[in-house]
Amino acid sequence: MSAVKQDDKRKVTVHRLKEMKDRGEKITMLTSYDYTMASIVDGAGIDAILVGDSASNVMCGNQTTLPISLDQMIYHGKAVAHATKRALVVVDMPFGYCVGNPLQSLDAAVRIMKETGADALKIEGGEELAPDIKKIIDAGIPVIGHLGLMPQSINKYGTYTVRAQENAEAEKLKRDALLLQEIGCSAIVLEKIPAALATEVTQSLRIPTIGIGAGSGTDGQVLVIHDMLGMNQGFSPRFLRRYANLHAVMTEAITQYITDVKEVTFPNKEEEY
């Protein structure tokens, strides 16, 4: 049975995310990168689907999110948008397309929106990219910000450890969150920061926050679908809860298929024409 209430099948928009925050309803978000997975996730009743640049890792096998291109993100975003009826579809702005040149950033944003049919963009960064983000928002494109651990900056960090543990970085994150709200962001993803800080930021904002590794005090949660379904066995951070072990299920099914074909038990007479 679908998790969506019978009276709650309207298309989710950024405005509806704000309504959810205002009434204290938690926001659910998962990633998807293809038509079939997005159909399942949307049908289950998720509020938002993130076409994350994590596709670089889980779909392309790259070590970081940096190599994925704009064209690749558009490809994945278009497939997901075609499958999605209810959820808000958010596409990540890939690395290198929003780096301090507002006109270049706007051009990439327009391409994503026009060619995918997505509902919003997600962009990593705070004060340094505020002019780019504002330019995109002023053009009528909803933007979800992203603060804390920003995977596109991994070469600067040198580690995926928890961010904003020191006072100076925490204070900057708080300032950046307020600035992103001021310039018109519709929500902010807070990744891998202390739970107390995420709660403080959430309570200081009118717009929703969506956490990943940021505790339960945010307005919503997001996970990578391949991680939470147990398809990816090599990634086990503290914040990840696995809701299935599809790696084992799929391996067993494929092994059985191999056996059946080699032993000529598939196809049987009932499976022939």
Image (cartoon, rainbow, N blue to C red):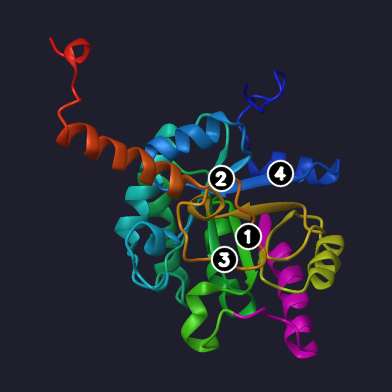
**Eye-nearest disc, 1 or 2:** 2
Q: Residues within 10 Å of mark 2 (few under 14, many from 20)?
A: some
Q: Closer to the N terminus: mark 3 or mark 2?
A: 3
Judged from the image, the secondary structure of the residue bearing numbered disc 4 is helix
Which of the two residues, 165 or 180, is positioned nearer the viewer here?
165
Pinpoint residue 234: horizontal percent, then vertical percent: 47, 66
Q: Earlier in the sequence, mark 3 or mark 4?
A: 4
Q: Amino acid at mark 1?
A: Leu
CA–CA distance in space, label 3 to label 2: 14 Å
* Residue drawn 23% across the image and 37% down it: 259
Where residue 84 appears, x then y in whole percent? Answer: 48, 33
Q: Nearer the viewer, mark 4 or mark 1?
A: 1
Residues in magenta? 161-189
Instruction: Verify whether residue 174 appears in magenta.
Output: yes
Marks 1 and 2, Cα distance to the nearest angstrom?
12 Å
Residue at the spot x=71%, y=44% of the render?
A: 17
Identify residue type, mark 3.
Ser
Residue 64: horizontal and vertical position, in percent?
41, 73
Residue pointed to by mark 1: 240
Picture quadrant of residue 78: top left
Q: Which mark is residue 17?
A: 4
Residue 259 as seen in the image, left or right of residue 125 = left
